[in-house]
């Protein structure tokens, strides 16, 4: 597909993708699952325009949220059958008061890699304790380098506090930070070359994520077509090269984590540039992850596919065999190719 700079399209593969997934093809057994993404809350201290609806979302009751021992019991079984990577996410994981307890419990299971995705605003307070708890890596979300735009996109966030969080993370020993940038047509797509420039002097990976029109958000109004907000990553790639020169591919295995990004490097850069192209080039056939929601649903897919409830496996006491059975039941629900809109909001799923 050839696109002019700034042009975005409705992506045909997804227009025709089945809303009801066809199951049981591709790597659909537990042996292929490497990463469990664990959402610890659906609440957040920001209201990003692509993630939350204008009037706010209805959050789960606090007493419906899983407890640290629940996350530990589920993750223990996952690590037992071969999950190597655990990721804490949300909502905003750092607003849970017991986040350090949760991180310590998961680190004690000795996964190869324990990471956390955050908007970064609580890191001045928490970067050190998270590091001490055993978190190996952080991913930070930032969608503009301009304070006024950052504030508008995040619904009130302060960019100076974000950068303070980055400093705190670096001081605490988190070095190879990843940055997630959700690119939205006409909102921040003019900043992609500036974002890529951050990788020249820092050992960071800046990852451009195609906007996914999941659930309701300020970009997805009932009845409206959200396609116009999506910018194909091929366009972003060309814009960066037009400013900075050729992007050289980097062997994916050298990137920490087991994410779906295609990774490149600018000439002489210390860091890397990644592209996550879930809309223009779905990577469902090689998907290696499952997701646990904060209220105990195990999800086979970010978009759709099925989910199973973990709650019966946890009450009155965790039952490892039952938990393992639920994992096996969930993984076969993965769709061959995800649909366009999904069936849950991003803040419930943790990205
Ligand atoms: N609050 C944390 C944060 O913002 O990093 C963690 C949760 S957030 C849901 C996880 C990731 O999903 C973030 O990098 C965010 O930018 C991304 N995200 C949220 N909504 C998205 C959407 N509609 N399309 C693409 N990425 C999205
Ligand atoms: Fe909050 Fe993260 Fe969603 Fe932004 S993307 S509203 S920071 S959960």
Image (cartoon, grey):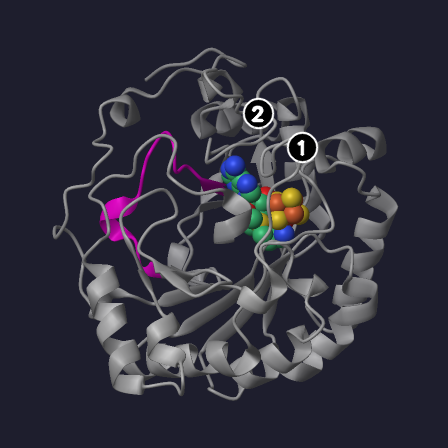
Can I make out residue 207 in this image?
no
Residue behind label 2 places its C-beta within 8 angstroms of ligand 1: yes
The answer to whether the beta carbon of the residue marked 1 is less than 8 Å from any atom of ligand 2 is no
Query: Quick one: label 1 or label 2, which is nearer the N terminus?
Result: 1
| Residue 287 lies within the magenta run | yes
Q: Quadrant of residue 129?
A: bottom right
Q: Is residue 311 above or below residue 270?
A: below
Q: Secondary structure at mark 2?
A: loop
Task: Label 1: state its secondary structure.
Answer: loop
What range of the chain is rendered magenta? 272-289
User: Does the segment drawn in magenta span residue 117?
Assistant: no
The residue lying toward the viewer, choosing from 182 and 275, is 182
* Label at residue 219: 2
Quarter in which the N terminus is drawn: top left
Q: Position of residue 78 (x, y in %)?
A: 34, 77
- Asked if the residue under mark 2 is in contact with the one under mark 1, i.e. CB atoms within 8 Å, the reply is no
Disc 1 vs disc 2: which is toward the camera? 1
| Residue at the image position 18 percent from the left and 65 percent from the top | 29
Q: Residue at x 29, y 66 (%)?
A: 33
Percent position of residue 87, x then y: 50, 66
Residue 163: give x, y in percent of width and height. 81, 51
Give the x, y percent position of residue 77. 34, 82
Q: Which residue is mark 1?
A: 55
């Amino acid at each position: 597909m050839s696109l002019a700079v700034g042009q975005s399209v409705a992506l045909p593969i997804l227009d025709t993708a089945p809303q009801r997934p066809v199951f049981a093809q591709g790597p659909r057994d537990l042996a292929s699952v490497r990463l469990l993404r664990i959402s610890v809350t659906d609440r957040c201290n920001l209201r990003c325009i692509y993630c939350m609806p204008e009037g706010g979302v209805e959050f789960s009751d606090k007493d419906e949220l899983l407890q640290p021992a629940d996350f530990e019991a589920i993750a223990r079984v996952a690590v037992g059958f071969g999950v190597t990577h655990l990721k804490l996410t949300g909502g905003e994981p750092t607003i849970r008061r017991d986040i350090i307890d949760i991180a310590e419990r998961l680190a004690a299971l000795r996964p190869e890699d324990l990471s956390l995705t955050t908007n970064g605003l609580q890191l001045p307070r928490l970067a050190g304790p998270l590091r001490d708890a055993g978190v190996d890596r952080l991913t930070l979300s930032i969608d503009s380098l301009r304070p006024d735009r950052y504030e508008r996109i995040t619904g009130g966030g302060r960019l100076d506090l974000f950068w303070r969080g980055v400093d705190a993370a670096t001081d605490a020993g988190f070095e190879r930070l990843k940055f997630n940038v959700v690119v939205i047509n006409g909102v921040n797509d003019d900043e992609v070359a500036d974002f890529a420039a951050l990788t020249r002097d820092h050992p960071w990976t800046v990852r451009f994520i195609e906007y996914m029109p999941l659930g309701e958000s300020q970009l997805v109004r009932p009845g409206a077509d959200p396609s116009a907000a999506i910018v194909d990553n091929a366009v972003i790639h060309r814009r960066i090269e037009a400013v900075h020169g050729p992007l050289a591919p980097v062997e994916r295995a050298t990137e920490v984590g087991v994410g779906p990004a295609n990774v490149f490097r600018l000439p002489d850069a210390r860091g890397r540039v990644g592209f996550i192209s879930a809309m223009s080039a779905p990577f469902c056939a090689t998907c290696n992850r499952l997701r646990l929601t904060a209220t105990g649903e195990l999800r086979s897919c970010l978009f759709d596919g099925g989910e199973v409830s973990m709650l019966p496996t946890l009450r009155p006491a965790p039952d490892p065999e039952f938990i393992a059975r639920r994992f096996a039941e969930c993984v076969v629900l993965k769709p061959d190719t995800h649909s366009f809109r999904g069936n849950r909001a991003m803040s419930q799923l943790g990205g």
